[in-house]
Amino acid sequence: MSARSRRDSVPSDDPRCRCGYPLDRFWPFCPDCGRPQSWRDTPPDAGDQCPSCGWAISPKFLRCPWCATMVYDEKLSAKKPLKAPKGYRMDAKCDWGCGGGVQYPMPFCPWCGRPQSWNEDDRFEGECAHCTRGVDDWMDNCPWCGHDATGRDLIPKALVQVRQLLRVAGVADWGYRILLRPGVSGVDPRYPKVVEIEKRYVTGVRRRDEIPWSMLIGLISHELGHSFLYHHWHWTSTRAFQRTFGEASKAYRINDDAWVDFQRRRVAITPVDHVSGYAARHPQEDFAETFRYYVTRRGRLRELFAELGQRRKGAAVYEKFILLKDYIQSLREWR
């Protein structure tokens, strides 16, 4: 069976995958089901199809802009590069200066056949952890390479352990979505269920960029603490929360580059009223660190309290864990 017959042909007037999901023109894969797509010249707009990949091309092209195959025709092909032949528009000039125009998202120039790069910062919310092309947070599959758009397939062991820890600790799933993304790990309060983890920790080519699995579990648990708090933000306005953790909505002025040892399992000796030094920076970080210790220690307060006594922690730390456990218990009862 040829490559063309294995792919789903997508009509250009109403681009939808066979699964029914709407597509953007010239996406090689469906971001919902992951099926490979074939953008043939139906209805005939461009005037021809590539003999190799079957995608729509202009008879004026010298090379296929989708697979770089030579499609030169002595009678039909243009003698010199054109800006926008019939059926295509010019979104940019060729990166290599051949003089021809290219339309987004052509991976190759239809005139010189050289690879093209596209700035997709304004088109998508993030980038694929596999091919670094643009993807949106809701995509399960990358529309460019077909791999997992979230990058979760790169950290299956850590995700399984985190889910197990949450279940044992009694924390019900609130619909969080973990994504590997470039930049700083964190959660946007406007999108509380989206948890971004710095992909360099997982895909870094230098060994010093990599972190142990135990530290990755601690990092994910910490960021899930932010997600949990933002998702239940109404709780922060209660008198009990403000008395225990403080005013969570106060101005957040923390250096994102500050180092935190998420691999550490034992509670720090100082400061007295917080589980770690980083927790003392802001009430939100205080809660996220408390949540991390609660989850990674499987919600076993008896063991935690014994350690708090050995570390000579203040009564405020005990109250934080008790408040968190009571709230988690109330959510389970409400469900």
Image (cartoon, rainbow, N blue to C red):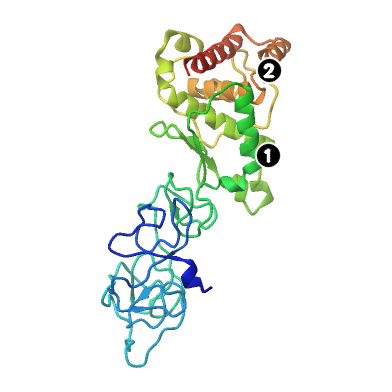
Name the residue beneath numbered marker 2: 269
Residue nearest the viewer, comparing 115 with 33: 33
Residue nearest the viewer, comparing 63 with 269: 63
Viewed as shown, does residue 25 lie left or right of 279? left
Q: Kindly identify the amino acid type of the residue bearing the numbered disc 2.
A: Ile
Q: Kindly identify the amino acid type of the residue bearing the numbered disc 1.
A: Trp
Viewed as shown, does residue 239 lie left or right of 312? left
Can you give x and y, in whole percent of width and height, for residue 218 in the image? 63, 32
- Observer able to see residue 210: yes
Residue nearest the viewer, comparing 41 with 207: 41
Q: Quadrant of residue 161?
A: top right
Can you give x and y, in whole percent of width and height, for residue 285 in the image? 52, 24
The correct choice, above or below, for 249 with respect to 260 in the image is: above
Residue at point 48% right, 19% down? 335
- The reply to whether the C-beta atoms of the residues labelled 1 and 2 are less than 8 Å apart is no
Name the residue beneath numbered marker 1: 213
